[in-house]
Image (cartoon, rainbow, N blue to C red):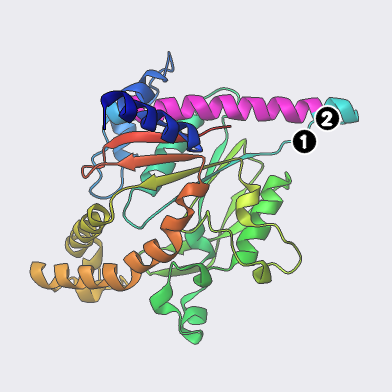
Amino acid sequence: MSTSLQHLETVACDTASPYITLERPKWASLRADTPLTLTEDDLEHLRGINENVSLEEVEEIYLPMSRLLNLYVGATQDLFRATATFLGKPSPKVPYVIAIAGSVAVGKSTTARILQALLARWPNHPKVDLVTTDGFLHPNSVLEERDLMQRKGFPESYDLRALFDFVVKVKSGERGVKHTVYSHFTYDRVPDDYRVVDQPDVLIIEGLNVLQPGNPTDLPRSRRFLSDLFDFSIYVDADQEVIKRWYVERFLTFRRTAFRDPSAYFHRYASLSRQEATEVATEIWTSINELNLVENIQPTRERADLILTKSDDHYVEKVRLRKL
């Protein structure tokens, strides 16, 4: 094929795609004059296990993202004020809801924490709350009763109605909305422990299957889905083999740290040799996490407004932004 024909084919593909694909240098330039408001000490508390996210990464990837979202939040706030003016009523405080999805071990939690920290430093939306969908997993007792412990993290393991109702209440501007808390240490909900979301400017919801369209039978009172309540959504992506390696590396790190506590749910893995632990982690990945990724998580990628594609060192190499 000639060079000119290849160019025309590329343009045609780009035109047909619902996304604009931006390589890292181009995306980084969209930061404009957005100031870097995080320090190395701040970033140290935001990084996940085995994720060497640098300040350079924050500058080139997260600052443009925070600038884009600040513009979107501002536009939405203006729209609410315009509607309130038209109706002759005070403008309600309705949060801008951002969803972040992706596989286990892909780094979505770190993305959520960094984004929360950056967005909270913009003057027009200083109150930014972060909620993970882990708190809406059914308790282990329920999962065991339904024979779903090996399907934990799959869509059917969540209390979808409770999650939907929670987001509806927050999105409606309700005060003091409670949500349950999950402990990765005990691998279960924490009994009688709740967090409160009280009219934030921005709400970030992070979870494996947060972009799932859902099953209408789970919500008989409504044909709306959880994703209908999101103002913006992000999918953190990487090659499956790369994510598998990150998962195994994280498991080995936990084996030397958190698993050593006798009260930890996975304490039984602390005494394994490195080879044994690698084999166990690989089996868990293949039988549970990879299956969930292929069947449920990855198919929701194209529902996202923005897709971050990572290389094998957690370095975001390109960004896909949905065309409006």
Image location of residue 90, percent across then percent down: 83, 30
Name above or below for residue 91 compared with residue 197.
above
Q: Which residue is mark 2?
A: 84
Q: Nearer the viewer, residue 270 or 239?
A: 239
Tell me the residue at 43%/43% (across/down): 112
Q: Is residue 145 left or right of residue 317?
A: right
Q: Is residue 18 left or right of residue 270?
A: right
Q: Which mark is residue 92?
A: 1
Magenta residue span: 60-82
The image quadrant of residue 316 is top left
Tell me the residue at 64%/59% (across/down): 164
Image location of residue 296, percent across then percent down: 45, 63
| Circle 2 residues within 10 Å: few <14, some 14–19, many ≥20 | some
Local secondary structure at mark 1: loop
Tell me the residue at 44%/17% (across/down): 34
The answer to whether marks 1 and 2 mark residues whose Cβ atoms lie closer than 8 Å is yes
Name above or below for residue 222 compared with residue 304.
below
Name above or below for residue 321 compared with residue 193.
above
Q: Amino acid at mark 2?
A: Ala
Magenta stretch contains residue 120: no
Residue 273 visible (yes or no): no
Q: Which mark is residue 33?
A: none
Q: Which is in the foreground here, disc 1 or disc 2? A: 2
Image location of residue 311, percent across then percent down: 25, 42
Position of the N terminus, as image quadrant, is: top left
Image location of residue 206, percent across then percent down: 48, 50
